[in-house]
Image: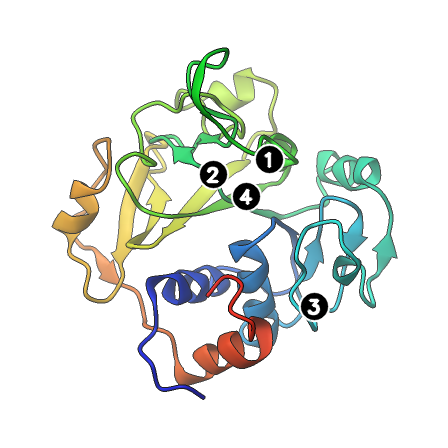
Amino acid sequence: MSEKPYTRTELMICVAARLFEDGTTCFIGTGIPMLAAMLAARTTAPHIVPVFEFGGTGAILEELPRAVGEARTWHKGLSALGICDTMEAAQRGFIDYGFLGGAQIDPYGNLNSVVIGDHDHPKARLPGSGGGNDIGSSCWRTIAIMQHQKRRFVPKVDFITTPGYLTGPGAREAAGLPRGSGPIAVVSTLALMDYDPETLRMRLKAVHPGVTVEEVIENTGFDLIIPDEVGVNEPPSAEELRLLREEIDPEGLYI
Protein backbone atom coordinates (compact mmCIF):
# COMPACT_ATOMS: atom_id res chain seq x y z
CA MET A 1 0.00 0.00 0.00
CA SER A 2 1.13 3.54 -0.72
CA GLU A 3 2.42 5.35 2.34
CA LYS A 4 1.16 8.74 1.16
CA PRO A 5 -0.73 10.72 3.82
CA TYR A 6 -4.50 10.44 3.77
CA THR A 7 -6.57 13.15 2.12
CA ARG A 8 -9.55 14.94 3.64
CA THR A 9 -11.78 13.04 1.23
CA GLU A 10 -10.41 9.72 2.48
CA LEU A 11 -10.90 10.84 6.08
CA MET A 12 -14.47 11.93 5.32
CA ILE A 13 -15.22 8.52 3.79
CA CYS A 14 -13.80 6.72 6.85
CA VAL A 15 -15.78 8.84 9.32
CA ALA A 16 -18.96 8.26 7.31
CA ALA A 17 -18.31 4.50 7.09
CA ARG A 18 -18.10 4.26 10.88
CA LEU A 19 -21.64 5.67 11.14
CA PHE A 20 -23.21 2.70 9.34
CA GLU A 21 -25.09 0.51 11.80
CA ASP A 22 -24.64 -3.20 11.17
CA GLY A 23 -27.75 -5.10 10.12
CA THR A 24 -29.63 -2.05 8.83
CA THR A 25 -31.01 -1.08 5.44
CA CYS A 26 -29.24 1.92 3.90
CA PHE A 27 -30.22 4.02 0.90
CA ILE A 28 -26.97 4.82 -0.92
CA GLY A 29 -26.42 7.75 -3.28
CA THR A 30 -23.84 8.06 -6.06
CA GLY A 31 -20.22 8.85 -5.25
CA ILE A 32 -18.81 9.23 -1.74
CA PRO A 33 -21.76 7.41 -0.06
CA MET A 34 -20.98 4.36 -2.19
CA LEU A 35 -17.35 4.32 -1.05
CA ALA A 36 -18.43 4.74 2.57
CA ALA A 37 -20.91 1.85 2.26
CA MET A 38 -18.32 -0.42 0.68
CA LEU A 39 -15.79 0.42 3.39
CA ALA A 40 -18.36 -0.17 6.14
CA ALA A 41 -19.28 -3.54 4.65
CA ARG A 42 -15.61 -4.57 4.77
CA THR A 43 -15.03 -3.33 8.33
CA THR A 44 -17.55 -2.37 11.01
CA ALA A 45 -20.89 -3.21 9.36
CA PRO A 46 -20.59 -6.44 7.34
CA HIS A 47 -24.34 -7.08 7.39
CA ILE A 48 -25.69 -3.80 6.04
CA VAL A 49 -28.22 -4.05 3.22
CA PRO A 50 -27.47 -1.39 0.60
CA VAL A 51 -30.46 -0.06 -1.34
CA PHE A 52 -30.11 1.85 -4.61
CA GLU A 53 -32.63 4.18 -6.18
CA PHE A 54 -33.24 2.17 -9.34
CA GLY A 55 -34.07 -1.05 -7.57
CA GLY A 56 -30.92 -2.87 -6.52
CA THR A 57 -31.30 -4.18 -2.95
CA GLY A 58 -28.73 -6.11 -0.94
CA ALA A 59 -26.02 -6.15 -3.60
CA ILE A 60 -22.57 -7.51 -2.73
CA LEU A 61 -20.45 -4.51 -3.65
CA GLU A 62 -17.32 -6.19 -4.93
CA GLU A 63 -16.65 -3.36 -7.39
CA LEU A 64 -17.45 0.34 -7.12
CA PRO A 65 -20.68 1.23 -9.01
CA ARG A 66 -20.44 4.29 -11.25
CA ALA A 67 -24.06 5.26 -10.64
CA VAL A 68 -27.19 4.15 -8.78
CA GLY A 69 -28.68 2.37 -11.80
CA GLU A 70 -25.83 0.32 -13.23
CA ALA A 71 -25.27 -3.44 -13.08
CA ARG A 72 -23.03 -3.48 -10.01
CA THR A 73 -25.89 -2.19 -7.83
CA TRP A 74 -27.69 -5.52 -8.47
CA HIS A 75 -24.66 -7.81 -8.19
CA LYS A 76 -25.63 -10.92 -6.15
CA GLY A 77 -28.42 -8.84 -4.64
CA LEU A 78 -31.53 -9.83 -2.75
CA SER A 79 -33.78 -8.26 -5.37
CA ALA A 80 -33.70 -6.30 -8.62
CA LEU A 81 -36.88 -4.28 -8.75
CA GLY A 82 -37.55 -0.77 -10.02
CA ILE A 83 -37.54 2.77 -8.71
CA CYS A 84 -41.25 2.73 -7.79
CA ASP A 85 -40.83 -0.43 -5.68
CA THR A 86 -37.77 1.01 -3.96
CA MET A 87 -39.46 4.29 -3.08
CA GLU A 88 -42.53 2.42 -1.88
CA ALA A 89 -40.34 0.35 0.44
CA ALA A 90 -38.97 3.58 1.93
CA GLN A 91 -42.48 5.03 2.32
CA ARG A 92 -43.55 1.86 4.13
CA GLY A 93 -40.75 2.41 6.65
CA PHE A 94 -38.42 -0.41 5.59
CA ILE A 95 -35.28 1.68 5.01
CA ASP A 96 -33.39 2.78 8.10
CA TYR A 97 -30.73 5.16 6.78
CA GLY A 98 -30.26 7.46 3.82
CA PHE A 99 -26.82 8.78 2.86
CA LEU A 100 -26.98 11.97 0.78
CA GLY A 101 -25.00 14.87 -0.61
CA GLY A 102 -25.91 18.34 -1.81
CA ALA A 103 -24.63 21.74 -2.87
CA GLN A 104 -26.10 23.56 0.14
CA ILE A 105 -27.20 22.66 3.66
CA ASP A 106 -28.77 24.89 6.33
CA PRO A 107 -28.86 24.75 10.16
CA TYR A 108 -31.86 22.38 10.15
CA GLY A 109 -30.31 19.93 7.69
CA ASN A 110 -32.35 20.93 4.63
CA LEU A 111 -30.39 20.11 1.47
CA ASN A 112 -30.35 21.80 -1.93
CA SER A 113 -29.26 20.07 -5.12
CA VAL A 114 -31.48 21.94 -7.62
CA VAL A 115 -30.43 25.58 -8.13
CA ILE A 116 -28.18 28.29 -6.74
CA GLY A 117 -30.04 31.60 -6.66
CA ASP A 118 -33.60 32.25 -7.81
CA HIS A 119 -35.30 29.13 -9.13
CA ASP A 120 -36.49 30.70 -12.40
CA HIS A 121 -33.34 32.74 -12.99
CA PRO A 122 -30.59 30.77 -11.21
CA LYS A 123 -26.90 31.53 -11.02
CA ALA A 124 -26.32 27.81 -11.49
CA ARG A 125 -28.60 24.89 -12.22
CA LEU A 126 -27.58 21.71 -10.38
CA PRO A 127 -28.19 18.01 -11.18
CA GLY A 128 -31.55 18.01 -9.44
CA SER A 129 -33.37 15.91 -6.89
CA GLY A 130 -33.04 12.37 -8.16
CA GLY A 131 -34.30 10.46 -5.14
CA GLY A 132 -33.15 13.10 -2.66
CA ASN A 133 -36.62 14.21 -1.63
CA ASP A 134 -37.89 10.64 -1.26
CA ILE A 135 -34.88 9.59 0.81
CA GLY A 136 -35.04 12.59 3.13
CA SER A 137 -38.80 12.27 3.52
CA SER A 138 -39.14 8.52 3.96
CA CYS A 139 -35.95 7.07 5.49
CA TRP A 140 -35.89 7.11 9.27
CA ARG A 141 -32.47 8.72 9.60
CA THR A 142 -30.39 10.62 7.07
CA ILE A 143 -26.71 11.51 7.00
CA ALA A 144 -25.28 14.20 4.71
CA ILE A 145 -21.74 13.97 3.31
CA MET A 146 -20.42 17.32 2.06
CA GLN A 147 -17.52 19.62 1.33
CA HIS A 148 -17.30 22.13 4.19
CA GLN A 149 -17.38 25.67 2.80
CA LYS A 150 -19.26 28.80 3.83
CA ARG A 151 -21.04 28.91 0.46
CA ARG A 152 -22.35 25.39 1.10
CA PHE A 153 -23.25 25.73 4.81
CA VAL A 154 -25.77 28.56 4.48
CA PRO A 155 -28.38 30.20 6.74
CA LYS A 156 -31.15 29.25 4.30
CA VAL A 157 -30.90 26.99 1.27
CA ASP A 158 -31.96 28.52 -2.04
CA PHE A 159 -34.22 25.54 -2.70
CA ILE A 160 -35.31 22.65 -0.45
CA THR A 161 -34.57 19.50 -2.41
CA THR A 162 -34.35 17.23 0.61
CA PRO A 163 -36.24 18.13 3.79
CA GLY A 164 -34.32 18.15 7.02
CA TYR A 165 -36.09 19.57 10.04
CA LEU A 166 -37.53 22.30 7.76
CA THR A 167 -37.99 25.32 10.08
CA GLY A 168 -37.40 23.57 13.40
CA PRO A 169 -39.20 21.46 16.02
CA GLY A 170 -42.55 20.11 14.86
CA ALA A 171 -42.15 21.25 11.25
CA ARG A 172 -41.52 17.79 9.76
CA GLU A 173 -44.56 16.37 11.50
CA ALA A 174 -46.70 19.34 10.41
CA ALA A 175 -45.64 18.64 6.82
CA GLY A 176 -46.86 15.05 7.15
CA LEU A 177 -43.47 13.37 7.52
CA PRO A 178 -43.01 10.47 9.98
CA ARG A 179 -42.51 11.37 13.61
CA GLY A 180 -39.02 10.47 14.80
CA SER A 181 -37.45 10.74 11.36
CA GLY A 182 -34.94 13.28 10.06
CA PRO A 183 -31.24 14.04 9.74
CA ILE A 184 -28.88 12.81 12.43
CA ALA A 185 -25.40 13.75 11.18
CA VAL A 186 -23.31 15.67 8.68
CA VAL A 187 -19.88 14.42 7.70
CA SER A 188 -17.81 17.16 6.08
CA THR A 189 -14.22 17.64 5.00
CA LEU A 190 -13.60 19.42 8.32
CA ALA A 191 -15.75 17.80 10.98
CA LEU A 192 -18.63 15.64 12.14
CA MET A 193 -21.84 17.42 13.10
CA ASP A 194 -25.05 16.22 14.72
CA TYR A 195 -28.26 18.02 15.77
CA ASP A 196 -29.27 19.49 19.11
CA PRO A 197 -32.23 17.42 20.36
CA GLU A 198 -34.12 20.48 21.64
CA THR A 199 -33.67 23.07 18.88
CA LEU A 200 -32.89 20.58 16.05
CA ARG A 201 -30.14 22.93 14.86
CA MET A 202 -26.81 21.63 13.65
CA ARG A 203 -24.16 21.11 16.35
CA LEU A 204 -20.43 20.48 16.11
CA LYS A 205 -19.62 17.04 17.49
CA ALA A 206 -16.00 16.36 16.50
CA VAL A 207 -13.34 17.97 14.34
CA HIS A 208 -11.00 16.07 12.06
CA PRO A 209 -7.34 15.73 13.10
CA GLY A 210 -5.47 18.98 12.52
CA VAL A 211 -8.68 21.03 12.22
CA THR A 212 -9.58 23.63 14.84
CA VAL A 213 -13.03 24.64 16.04
CA GLU A 214 -12.26 28.13 14.75
CA GLU A 215 -11.62 26.76 11.26
CA VAL A 216 -15.01 25.03 11.27
CA ILE A 217 -16.73 28.23 12.42
CA GLU A 218 -14.97 30.31 9.75
CA ASN A 219 -16.20 27.94 7.04
CA THR A 220 -19.81 27.79 8.24
CA GLY A 221 -22.26 30.44 7.05
CA PHE A 222 -24.53 30.24 10.11
CA ASP A 223 -24.18 30.01 13.89
CA LEU A 224 -23.20 26.42 14.54
CA ILE A 225 -23.91 25.18 18.06
CA ILE A 226 -20.55 24.65 19.80
CA PRO A 227 -20.76 22.45 22.90
CA ASP A 228 -18.37 22.76 25.84
CA GLU A 229 -16.54 19.63 24.71
CA VAL A 230 -15.74 18.92 21.05
CA GLY A 231 -14.21 15.59 20.16
CA VAL A 232 -11.59 14.67 17.56
CA ASN A 233 -12.31 12.02 14.93
CA GLU A 234 -9.96 9.07 14.63
CA PRO A 235 -7.74 9.26 11.53
CA PRO A 236 -8.02 6.52 8.90
CA SER A 237 -6.30 3.32 9.89
CA ALA A 238 -3.75 1.66 7.64
CA GLU A 239 -6.30 -1.04 6.82
CA GLU A 240 -9.02 1.47 5.93
CA LEU A 241 -6.64 3.25 3.56
CA ARG A 242 -5.54 -0.03 2.01
CA LEU A 243 -9.14 -1.03 1.37
CA LEU A 244 -10.00 2.35 -0.14
CA ARG A 245 -6.97 2.60 -2.38
CA GLU A 246 -6.48 -1.00 -3.42
CA GLU A 247 -9.93 -2.63 -3.35
CA ILE A 248 -12.69 0.00 -3.37
CA ASP A 249 -11.39 2.80 -5.61
CA PRO A 250 -8.14 1.58 -7.19
CA GLU A 251 -8.74 3.79 -10.25
CA GLY A 252 -8.96 6.91 -8.09
CA LEU A 253 -12.38 7.95 -9.35
CA TYR A 254 -13.24 9.67 -6.07
CA ILE A 255 -10.06 9.54 -3.98
Front position in the image: 30 or 209? 30
Residue 236 drawn at (x, y percent)? 37, 74
Q: Quadrant of residue 43?
A: bottom right
Distance between the alpha carbons at the discs numbered 3 and 2: 24 Å
Q: Earlier in the sequence, mark 4 or mark 2?
A: 2
Q: Amino acid at mark 1?
A: Gly
Residue 45 drawn at (x, y percent)? 59, 69
How busy is the neighbourhood of tag 3: few (under 14 within 10 Å), some, or many (20 plus)?
Answer: many
Q: Earlier in the sequence, mark 3 or mark 4?
A: 3
Distance between the alpha carbons at the discs numbered 4 and 2: 16 Å
Residue that numbered label 1 is attached to: 132
Q: Amino acid at mark 4?
A: Arg
Residue that numbered label 4 is attached to: 141
Query: Do the CB atoms of the residues marked 4 and 2 lie less than 8 Å apart?
Result: no
- Examine the rendered structure and indicate whether residue 50 appears above or below residue 87: below
Q: Quadrant of residue 58?
A: bottom right
| Apparent side of residue 52 relative to residue 242 in the rendered image (left or right) | right
Q: Earlier in the sequence, mark 1 or mark 3?
A: 3
Q: Amino acid at mark 2?
A: Gly
Camera-near label (4 vs 2) is: 2
Residue 24 drawn at (x, y percent)? 65, 57
Residue that numbered label 2 is attached to: 102
Query: Do the CB atoms of the residues marked 3 and 4 lie less than 8 Å apart?
Result: no
Q: Earlier in the sequence, mark 2 or mark 1?
A: 2
Front position in the image: 24 or 28? 28
Placement of the N terminus among the 4 image quadrants: bottom left
Q: Earlier in the sequence, mark 1 or mark 4?
A: 1
Residue that numbered label 3 is attached to: 61
